[in-house]
Image (spheres, rainbow, N blue to C red):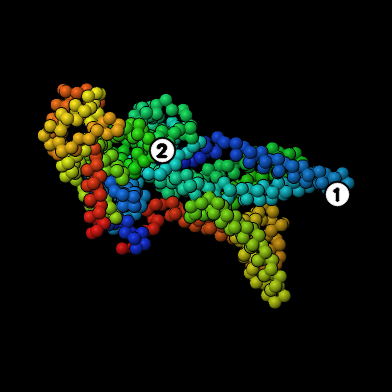
């Protein structure tokens, strides 16, 4: 019977998140930042249009690319803050025992928290729709591409949310969980790129086909290759063209690897939330 | 209703609970008493399926708790010693959440909330934010939460700790009402005298070992002997003191600064009742309170023996 209804934890989380000013403050700041920079990008492009170097469609495309990358990065950096206190917050509040004592399974607790985090991301996406409306006015972008971007942002939020939840379930303190989440995020975004660049530069002369680009499969930004192949997959493929044949792209591999990582994180988080599995001894 | 067999819990090499055996029948209030660190909370957490035992079995309502924790949780309502609340929720929303999370339909939970809040004395706080409740009210709200899914068994870990005397009396009355409703209750405390007023059975635990498990009447019988009774009369204190000294079983009577008489009495509870009757016919009696000092002495004696063992 419980499975047919909305997870009560999700309903409770949504209610409490929407009840304080923090969410609205965050959305307002997010829109101000995104909208402000979008105006600057538009103005700089419009200057080129007036000088004859750009078409309106090209301005629209550039603005879309900017919005996509900016929104992608903002959401990616926002998710650890949203999910980092999901379980550790319950521990700090001393409500975790009361929660695990209900009929909610550890999996339902973890997915309830995850869905609440993703719901906030959806709210951020919906709030940004008017900005994309402006992009449509300019042209150069199809509604399917925008839809694809939203799916992509949600997918990355899911991946980052899963490992943030895992750290939140592991640590007793929210601060520790958030620091661990950001450390992993920074390694995946910046560390992998740095490693890939350095290793490629060092070995290029001697080992031109070394598969160091595979490091990039852990980088969430690689998933943007689905929407912007010109910036991502093509660059990698130009270096290692013999690795990808038959339509296989690096973002396919990235999706697979990050999907597995998310599933594994979810599994570990579920185990960490189960009180009967903690400190279990043999014999 | 509850059967605990050889229950053992180790944290590393430290034995928090060792081979605990006791049984609680339906409708009983079992007081679990012991000094701090004796293993009360560990035992209750294992009963609440929040901690896996190292060895032994817990059977609640015929179900082996470790094998079927979800089903067991349907049968139990647990109130931990330290707990938090969701401050952003209103009282009714808080109970609705836990009711739904416990597998009940929202409409059913909403129907039950008024009577539940009435029971714990929070009826008028229905629409208040949890954040605005006092500590005692939050304690009572947590008790209502433990009852929201109509459990047959209540596990209360030091529910009276931190409460003022009035709130303690109110809690005691609520527990008596719950017993009348047929609930089986295990309640822990480190004060034996407090538990003896509400429990039908009592278990004394020390250093993880159950030193005694018996009906309260049996425990009280063990401490009957010299008891100190506090007697307060409206006037004629000196006359009352002299009269008391002449009575059978009275060893000593002293007049305290407060105006009360401290009577050292040797006799069983029937003799105490007879003395009370006689006293009430001769004097305007304000107070006749047998001191629980001996219960505490018994507790000290038992826990010391267990420590030596």
Q: Which mark is residue A103?
A: none
Residue at 60% x, 55% y is: A182
Query: How packed is label 2: few (under 14 Cα within 10 Å), some, or many (20 or more)?
Result: many
Relative depth, front residue between B65 and B91: B91
- Residue B256 is left or right of residue A23, and the answer is left
Q: CA distance from mark 2 to mark 1?
A: 62 Å
Asked if both marks, 2 and 1, belong to the same chain, the answer given is no
Relative depth, front residue between A18 and B37: B37
Residue A47, quarter of the rendered image:
top right
Taking the view exactly as shown, the residue that stands out farthest to the right is A51
Taking the view exactly as shown, the residue that stands out farthest to the bottom is A206
- Residue A139 is left or right of residue A282, and the answer is right
To which residue does mark 1 refer? A53
- Counting from the top left corner in percent of width and height, residue B190 is at 31, 45
To which residue does mark 2 refer? B98
- Counting from the top left corner in percent of width and height, residue B18 is at 27, 57
Residue A239 appearing in the image: yes
Q: Nearer the viewer, mark 2 or mark 1?
A: 2
Query: How packed is label 1: few (under 14 Cα within 10 Å), some, or many (20 or more)?
Result: few
Relative depth, front residue between A259 and B278: B278
Residue B270, quarter of the rendered image:
top left
Q: Secondary structure at mark 2?
A: helix
- Counting from the top left corner in percent of width and height, residue B6 is at 24, 55
Question: How many dots with numbers?
Answer: 2
- Counting from the top left corner in percent of width and height, residue B80 is at 37, 44
Taking the view exactly as shown, the residue that stands out farthest to the left is B248
Residue at 19% x, 23% y is: B283
- Residue B48 is left or right of residue A214, and the answer is left
Residue B31 appearing in the image: no
Marked residue chain, label 2: B
Marked residue chain, label 1: A
Residue at 72% x, 57% y is: A230
């Amino acid at each position: 019977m419980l499975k047919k209804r909305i997870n009560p934890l999700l309903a409770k989380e949504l209610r409490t998140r929407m009840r304080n000013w923090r969410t609205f403050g965050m959305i307002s700041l997010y829109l101000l930042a995104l909208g402000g920079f979008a105006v600057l990008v538009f103005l700089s492009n419009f200057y080129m249009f007036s000088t004859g170097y750009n078409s309106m469609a090209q301005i629209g495309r550039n603005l879309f690319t900017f919005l996509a990358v900016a929104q992608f990065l903002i959401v990616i950096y926002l998710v650890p803050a949203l999910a980092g206190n999901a379980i550790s917050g319950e521990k700090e509040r001393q409500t975790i025992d009361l929660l695990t004592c209900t009929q909610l399974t550890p999996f339902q607790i973890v997915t309830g928290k995850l869905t609440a985090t993703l719901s906030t991301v959806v709210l951020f996406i919906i709030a940004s729709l008017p900005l994309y409306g402006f992009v449509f006015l300019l042209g150069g972008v199809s509604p399917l591409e925008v839809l694809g971007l939203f799916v992509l942002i949600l997918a990355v939020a899911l991946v980052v949310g899963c490992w943030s939840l895992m750290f939140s379930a592991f640590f007793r303190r929210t601060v520790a969980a958030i620091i661990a989440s950001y450390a992993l995020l920074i390694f995946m975004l910046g560390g992998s790129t740095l490693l890939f660049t350095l290793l490629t530069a060092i070995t290029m002369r001697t080992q031109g086909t070394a598969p160091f680009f595979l490091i990039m499969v852990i980088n969430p930004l690689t998933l943007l290759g689905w929407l912007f192949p010109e910036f991502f997959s093509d660059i990698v493929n130009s270096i290692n063209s013999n690795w990808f044949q038959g339509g296989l792209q690096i973002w396919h591999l990235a999706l697979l690897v990050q999907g597995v990582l998310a599933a594994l994180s979810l599994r570990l988080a579920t185990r960490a939330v189960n009180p009967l599995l903690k400190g279990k001894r043999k014999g | 209703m509850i059967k605990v067999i050889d229950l053992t819990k180790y944290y590393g090499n430290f034995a928090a609970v060792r081979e605990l055996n006791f049984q609680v029948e339906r409708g009983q209030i079992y007081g679990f008493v012991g000094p701090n660190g004796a293993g009360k909370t560990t035992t209750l957490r294992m009963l609440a399926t929040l901690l896996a035992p190292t060895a032994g079995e817990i059977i609640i309502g015929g179900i082996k708790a470790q094998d079927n924790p979800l089903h067991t949780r349907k049968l139990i309502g647990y109130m931990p010693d330290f707990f938090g609340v969701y401050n952003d929720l209103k009282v009714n929303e808080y109970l609705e959440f836990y009711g739904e999370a416990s597998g009940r339909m929202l409409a059913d939970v909403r129907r039950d909330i008024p009577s539940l809040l009435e029971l714990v004395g929070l009826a008028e706080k229905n629409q208040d934010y949890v954040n605005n409740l006092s500590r005692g009210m939050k304690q009572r709200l947590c008790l209502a939460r433990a009852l929201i899914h109509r459990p047959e068994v209540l596990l209360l870990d030091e529910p009276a700790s931190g409460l003022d005397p009035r709130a303690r009396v109110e809690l005691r009355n609520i527990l008596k009402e719950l017993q009348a409703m047929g609930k089986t209750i295990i309640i822990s405390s480190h004060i034996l005298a407090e538990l003896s007023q509400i429990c039908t059975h009592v278990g004394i635990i020390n250093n993880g070992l159950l030193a005694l498990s018996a009906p309260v009447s049996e425990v009280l019988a063990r401490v009957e002997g010299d008891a100190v009774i506090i007697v307060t009369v409206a006037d004629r204190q000196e006359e009352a003191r002299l009269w008391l000294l002449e009575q059978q079983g009275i060893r000593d009577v002293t007049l305290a600064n407060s105006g009360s008489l401290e009577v050292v009495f040797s006799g069983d509870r029937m003799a105490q009742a007879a003395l009370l009757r006689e006293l009430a016919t001769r004097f305007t009696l304000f107070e006749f309170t047998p001191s629980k000092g001996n219960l505490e002495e018994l507790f000290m004696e038992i826990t010391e023996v267990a420590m030596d063992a």
